[in-house]
Image (tube, grey):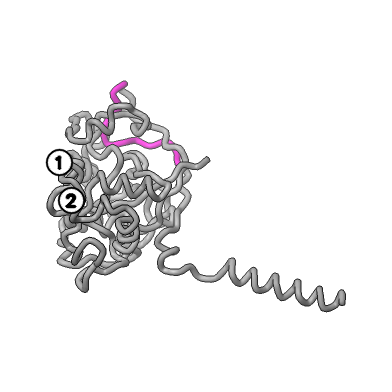
């Protein structure tokens, strides 16, 4: 009896181990998050208090941008965010325009490609529904500054050249699947090379610190921010990102603008 019990327990351990290390499904794969260690970071614009550096606390970030399949699940469970029902104050008339209808992607839309034509309001609602949030500008820029093999590559001329080349390149009519633009030091894919991405405080170049705690941030999402007080006048890629963000309004939906989520470490 003891011998049989031991064999049973051994078999159970083998099966359990196999489950733990099995490859994730496509749905789970696109839901994975990476640990971003955080640290001291120099944003493109100096702070209102005259300082140059901010401290980015450790956080988790989605490994991939949110896909059409993931957003489809969201709108099915939250009908108020379906294309035919969303209010234009929350999303302009281009919202999800490449989908066939409210709950069908259609043959021209790849479910594993990043969702685009989605407003800040919709992205923010999705993040809350998923138990996450949108990254701040500082968090996004901190994670995006990582090269393939080091946590900070923004001062690398070749690194910045590749980013500029991507910004100048047309995406065409159909986006590639998530993961196609490669990963960086943190194990995060597609930060630079697939789509632009919403941030929580997307147009707040003059906001400082952890701006998601600033009481006026959400009420000011229709106001552009800007500053000539740049910390690195040679970082053209960052200038393009800040310029693009400051041109947005929260209900805008654009062909090459998607998002990913982050989560606080508790």
Q: Which residue sits at x=37%, y=30%?
A: 213
Q: Is residue 39 magenta?
A: yes
Relative to 214, residue 128 above or below = below
Relative to 174, residue 238 above or below = above
* Residue 163: quadrant of the picture: bottom left
In this rendered view, identify the residue nearer to me: 192 or 14: 14
Q: Which residue is mark 2?
A: 253
Give the Cα distance between marks 1 and 2: 12 Å
Q: Is residue 148 left or right of residue 244?
A: right
Q: Which mark is residue 247?
A: 1
Q: Quadrant of the N terminus?
A: bottom right
> Could you tell me residue 200's position as x and y percent?
30, 40
Question: Magenta-highlighted stretch: main secondary structure?
Answer: loop
Q: Is residue 185 magenta?
A: no
> Could you tell me residue 228's position as x and y percent?
18, 30
Q: Secondary structure at mark 2?
A: loop
Q: Is residue 249 left or right of residue 218?
A: left
Q: Secondary structure at mark 1?
A: loop
**Crowding near the residue tagged with mark 2, few <14, some 14–19, many ≥20 C-alpha atoms within 10 Å:** many
Q: Mark 1 near mark 2, Cβ–Cβ under 8 Å? A: no
Q: Which residue sits at x=18%, y=39%?
A: 246
> Could you tell me residue 146's position as x and y percent?
38, 50
Q: Which residue sits at x=15%, y=45%?
A: 88
- The part of the chain drawn in magenta is 38-49
Q: Which residue sits at x=23%, y=57%?
A: 116
> Could you tell me residue 188's position as x and y percent?
40, 56
């Amino acid at each position: 009896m003891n011998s049989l019990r031991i064999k049973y327990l051994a078999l159970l351990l083998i099966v359990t181990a196999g489950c733990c290390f099995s490859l994730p499904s496509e749905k789970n794969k696109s839901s994975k998050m990476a640990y971003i260690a955080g640290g001291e970071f120099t944003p493109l614009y100096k702070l209102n208090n005259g300082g140059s550096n901010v401290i980015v606390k450790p956080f988790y970030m989605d490994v991939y941008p949110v896909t059409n399949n993931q957003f489809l699940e969201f709108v099915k469970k939250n009908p108020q965010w379906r294309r035919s029902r969303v209010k234009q104050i929350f999303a302009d008339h281009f919202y999800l325009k490449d989908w066939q209808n409210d709950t069908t992607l259609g043959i021209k839309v790849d479910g594993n490609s990043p969702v685009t034509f989605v407003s800040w309001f919709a992205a923010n609602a999705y993040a809350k529904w998923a138990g996450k949030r949108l990254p701040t500008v500082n968090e996004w820029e901190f994670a995006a500054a990582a090269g393939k093999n080091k946590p900070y590559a923004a001062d690398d001329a070749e690194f910045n050249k590749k980013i500029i080349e991507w910004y100048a390149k047309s995406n065409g009519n159909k986006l590639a699947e998530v993961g196609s633009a490669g990963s960086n030091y943190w194990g995060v894919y597609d930060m630079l090379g697939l789509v632009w991405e919403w941030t929580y405080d997307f147009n707040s170049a003059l906001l400082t610190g952890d701006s998601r705690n600033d009481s006026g941030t959400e009420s000011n999402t229709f106001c552009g921010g800007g500053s000539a007080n740049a910390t690195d006048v040679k970082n053209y890629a960052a200038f393009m990102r800040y310029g693009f963000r400051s041109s947005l309004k929260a209900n805008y939906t654009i062909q090459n603008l998607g998002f990913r989520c982050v989560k606080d470490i508790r």
